[in-house]
Image: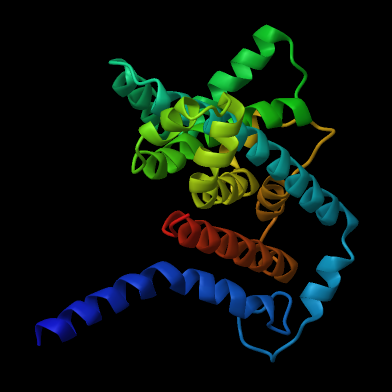
Amino acid sequence: MKAFTQKAFLFFVFFFLYTPILILILYSVNDAKFSLQWHGFSWQWYRELFQDRGLWSAFFNSIFLGVCASFIATLLGLLASVNLFLFRTRKQNSFYILLLLLIIIPDLVLGVALLLFFNIMQIPLGFLSLLIAHITFCLPFVILTIKSRINTLDPNIYFSALDLGASRYVALTKVLLPLLWSAILSALLLSFTLSFDDVMISYFVAGPDFNILPLAIYSLVRTGVTPELNALCTITFFISMILVTLSYRLSGKPS
């Protein structure tokens, strides 16, 4: 009876969480533009979506921005994690508290703060401002993801390689990094997903010349939910689900 109750509770939780998404997917293939009644199965809205050049431009802009932001954030996060691992100090806990603070504070606050920073530094709003903003909020996730893996290692493996005659570069690339590949790839995929899905921070720092998919979806929602929008959100959901699943599997996979 106890096992049945636990399973029923889990079913209710997942049903509550995923029912709206299932409805979204269902209506993306409904052969009716304005009616909420089921009129039959159709790929019509996906075909019309693929013919919308504005949305596809925003989609590829999001891909390009996500790739750039995730690679730079992962590189910076990797360097920071390795330095914190090899050269430990008493103030490391304070550093990690600051990282957690960036994760905890509302996106609204971070978005306004970044907008104010760009105005003071006279950085025009557009691709560069979006790139800096996305690197900023992805970096804490990258460092904490790599930290969870690197803290399971013994720092002596790096210093032993140095004692055996290896250079710092060789000890880093041939000894330490191969043990971190799964965490690095996990952090890369996670940061890309965060960048690809972000709306709130991007809303404050985006410019008129560089539109991205989340903001395009947001602007479409304000005029009403259409089947094309359902199809677009369905595609975005599956992309995010695949990336998050890969990130999760890699984070738990030993190198």
Q: Is residue 33 above or below residue 178?
A: below
Q: How is the image coloured?
A: rainbow
Q: Residue at x 40, y 20 (%)?
A: 87
What residue lies at 31% left-to-right and 78% top-to-bottom? 11
Q: Note whether 129 is above or below 153 in the view shown.
A: above
Residue with the most extreme bottom position: 40
Q: Residue furthest left?
A: 1
Mark yes or no: residue 160 visible.
yes
132 relative to 139 in the view: left or right: right
Q: Please tell me whether residue 217 is drawn above or below residue 236 in the rendered image.
A: above
x, y percent for residue 151: 35, 38
The structure residue drawn at horizontal position 42% and vertical position 31%, both measured from the top left corner, is 160
Looking at the rendering, which quadrant does residue 144 occupy?
top left
Q: Nearer the viewer, residue 73 or 228?
A: 73
Viewer-proximal residue among 163 and 28: 163
Image quarter in which the N terminus is found: bottom left
Q: Where does the image place residue 225, in percent across and percent down from the top left?
A: 66, 63
Determine whether 229 is above or below 69 in the image. below
**Residue 206 in the image: x percent, y percent?**
72, 32
Instruction: Name which residue lies at 65% across and 48% down.
Output: 196
